[in-house]
Amino acid sequence: MGGMKKRLVVLTGAGISAESGLKTFRDSDGLWEGYAIEDVATPRAWGKNPELVLSFYNERRRNVLGASPNAAHIGLAALEEFFEVQIITQNIDDLHERGGSSSVLHLHGEIFGRKSDRDGWLKDRITGDMLPGDLAPDGGVWRPDIVWFEEPVPLIIEAAEIVRAADIFVVVGTSLVVYPAAGLVDYVQPDVTVYVVDRKLPLISRPGVRSIEAPATEGVAKLKELLLADLF
């Protein structure tokens, strides 16, 4: 295959990790593993009950450690043979990386990261449990490196630029209801083909959308067929 590889940008959401056994807060009545979002995933929750917040994310971290990438994660990584693939994920797990993807941007933070609640750019990696009151070097308290609801999304501008430069844009396993991530679709250039893979397809109001109504594992396999048919 001659020439430069086309830039394939993929926006993924919780649906791609669901088949690895990781639940999402939209599974049932807006609850995430039985917790109300405002009690565990907002700055207010951190101010009110940091022990509960840490306990919740410690459990999420253990869940991710026990999960494995599925065929959808691995399938997207395999596309790097044919395309320059950039993953933009709303997920806080590391299943894309473990599935083999070499370029992953985590819009909403990472479960294996922590940051100072005084200086959000002071960060560290953690795989074990976080304990209440653990201090960062700047005297702040370590908090999960997660972008909570009601917080700005620092990487959204970088993500928008990546989407703007896409030759092909793919959405996998996201309902496109959480903003600003959902608004990234608006940065896709008008002549770029958009593929959407989901069990329940989100509405994207632009012409030429190619829909694959299927779970992520099945849908990514179908996506690969379509992409390679167009390529060769």
Image (cartoon, helix red, strand yellow):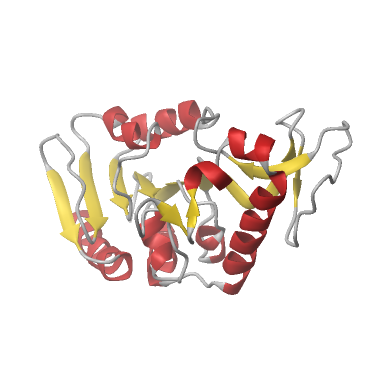
Q: Position of residue 89 (x, y in %)?
A: 45, 48
Query: Residue at 72% across / 42% down in the picture?
Result: 143
- The part of the image, by quadrant, that contains residue 166 is top left
Quadrant including the C terminus: bottom left
State left or right for residue 50 relative to residue 81. right
Judging depth in this view, the residue of 196 and 25 nearest the camera is 25
Vertical order, 198 against 67 (above or below): above
Q: Position of residue 51 (x, y in %)?
A: 72, 50
Query: Residue at 50% across / 55% down in the picture?
Result: 35
Query: Residue at 16% across / 53% down in the picture?
Result: 211
Q: Position of residue 74 (x, y in %)?
A: 44, 67
Judging depth in this view, the residue of 202 and 103 nearest the camera is 202
Residue 210 visible: yes
- The part of the image, by quadrant, that contains residue 121 is top right
Q: Position of residue 214 (x, y in %)?
A: 22, 65
Vertical order, 170 against 44 (above or below): below
State left or right for residue 37 relative to residue 127. left
The number of numbered discs placed on residues in the rendered structure image is: 0
Query: Residue at 47% across / 26% down in the picture?
Result: 157
Judging depth in this view, the residue of 212 and 58 nearest the camera is 58
Quadrant including the N terminus: bottom left
